[in-house]
Image: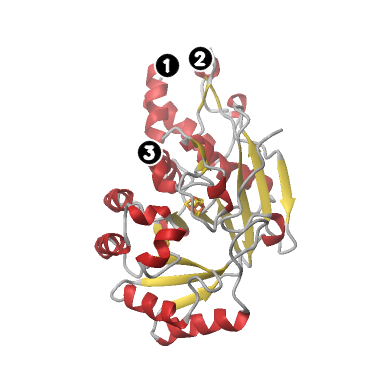
């Protein structure tokens, strides 16, 4: 019988397991503390757990944190970590240090089924969802790779896949990451979930009261432009999406992030910028402009710098907080929309 991996179990599930094995719930809480807080992954090293409990546990379960198959450093200091799972599938996470922050971009699916036309990941189609353990494992795996006095400070769900299309695993992983007592203890304000705009998922997430940040891959300010770029717009057009976002519960001083990849002569004109200003009126918004990252075979180009800056100025003049995000990891194929891994030969 194959043993189950405890990484990805909610603390309450670890308590249930302890009871199932004839121990008290307290033993489950100790187990959670070892795995998520002390980051100890060998059952034998969990010294305050009774030996017989550890023995019974060892027959049923393991604590496995994935080892990256490959780590590719980038000139800008970021590192792409490629993981290979037992089924042969590969995914990537990207560690991006910036002053005293270390941001980790995690994947939620192998591939992606949403086929955004500017995205390399979209080209490969959806293979499968990741489990909560495989998502949390990326954070534990990245932390293990960093120096002992360092750890991932911010987490963005912007890697391979659409997080809200893998809803149950997403929410379980968020609960483990944000549990201050028995989980990894990340402040929800340091976690951002990015979506193409799956309205039912956005509404459900709003009701979970997790208080994590929400980012919308918007990329266009009209259905005419967005529809052909992002097929999801046929299911949830901008009017429906923006209505859901207006209802989304935001904490004090929290804003919704809007990601907008700038594609030359597609969505980068002054008129597009003015339309974006009108679209976001009344929403506490922050816009991240992402100049397109070229990849071989792409049908789009990055706009010239003056056009990027002119677009930004229009948003700034209208009072919209706007940054231009020069993607990290461009030289290692780790920038947004480039997290595709070659299918193993
Ligand atoms: S941009 Fe995101 S949702 Fe769209 S195809 Fe790429 S990974 Fe999927």
Look at the image and tell me whether residue 215 can be seen: no
30 or 8: nearer the viewer = 8
64 or 266: nearer the viewer = 266
Q: Percent position (x, y) of residue 128?
A: 50, 35
Above or below: residue 106 compared with residue 293: above
In the picture, the disc for residue 220 is: none
Is the residue indicated by label 2 positioned so its CB lies within 8 Å of ligand 1? no
Tag 1–tag 3 contact (CB < 8 Å): no
Above or below: residue 300 compared with residue 73: below
Disc 2 residue crowd, few under 14, some 14–19, many 20+, Cα 10 Å: few
Q: Percent position (x, y) of residue 318?
A: 38, 85
In the picture, the disc for residue 56 is: 2
Q: Distance from label 2 to label 1 (Cα)?
A: 7 Å
Q: Percent position (x, y) of residue 126?
A: 50, 40
What residue is at 41 percent from the left and 41 percent from the top? 166
Q: Which residue is mark 3?
A: 168
Q: Quadrant of residue 285?
A: bottom left
**Sequence order check: which comes first, mark 2 or mark 3?**
2
Q: Quadrant of residue 234?
A: bottom left
Q: Which residue is mark 1?
A: 21
Left or right of 149 in this view: 18 = left
Disc 3 residue crowd, few under 14, some 14–19, many 20+, Cα 10 Å: few
Tag 2–tag 3 contact (CB < 8 Å): no
């Amino acid at each position: 019988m194959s043993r189950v991996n405890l990484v990805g179990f909610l603390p309450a599930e670890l308590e249930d397991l302890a009871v199932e094995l004839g121990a008290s719930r307290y033993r489950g809480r100790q187990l959670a503390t070892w795995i998520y807080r002390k980051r100890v992954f060998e059952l034998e090293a969990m010294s305050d757990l009774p030996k017989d409990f550890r023995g019974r546990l060892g027959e049923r379960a393991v604590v496995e944190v994935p080892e990256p198959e490959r780590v590719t450093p980038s000139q800008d200091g970021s590192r792409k970590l490629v993981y290979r799972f037992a089924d042969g599938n590969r995914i990537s996470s990207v560690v991006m240090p910036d002053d005293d922050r270390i941001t980790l971009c995690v994947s939620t699916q192998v591939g992606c089924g949403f086929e955004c036309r500017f995205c390399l990941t979209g080209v490969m189609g959806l293979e499968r969802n990741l489990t909560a353990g495989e998502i949390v494992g990326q954070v534990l795996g990245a932390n293990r790779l960093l120096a002992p006095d360092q750890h991932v400070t911010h987490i963005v769900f912007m890697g391979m896949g659409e997080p809200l299309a893998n809803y149950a695993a997403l929410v379980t992983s968020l609960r483990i990451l944000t549990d201050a007592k028995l989980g990894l203890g990340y402040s929800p304000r340091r976690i951002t979930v990015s979506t193409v705009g799956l309205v039912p998922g956005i509404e459900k997430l709003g009701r979970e009261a997790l208080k994590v940040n929400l980012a919308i891959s918007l990329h266009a300010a009209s259905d005419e432009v967005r529809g052909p770029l992002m097929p999801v717009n046929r299911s949830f057009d901008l009017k429906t999406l923006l209505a859901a976002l207006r209802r989304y519960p935001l904490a004090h001083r929290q804003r919704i992030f809007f990601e907008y990849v700038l594609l030359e002569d597609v969505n980068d004109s002054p008129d597009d910028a003015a339309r974006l200003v009108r679209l976001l009126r009344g929403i506490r918004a922050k816009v991240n402009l992402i100049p397109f990252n070229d990849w071989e075979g792409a049908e789009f180009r990055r706009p010239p710098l003056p056009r990027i800056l002119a677009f930004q100025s229009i948003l700034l003049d209208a009072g919209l907080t706007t940054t231009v995000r020069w993607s990290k990891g461009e030289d290692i194929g780790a920038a947004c929309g480039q997290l595709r891994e070659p299918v193993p030969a």
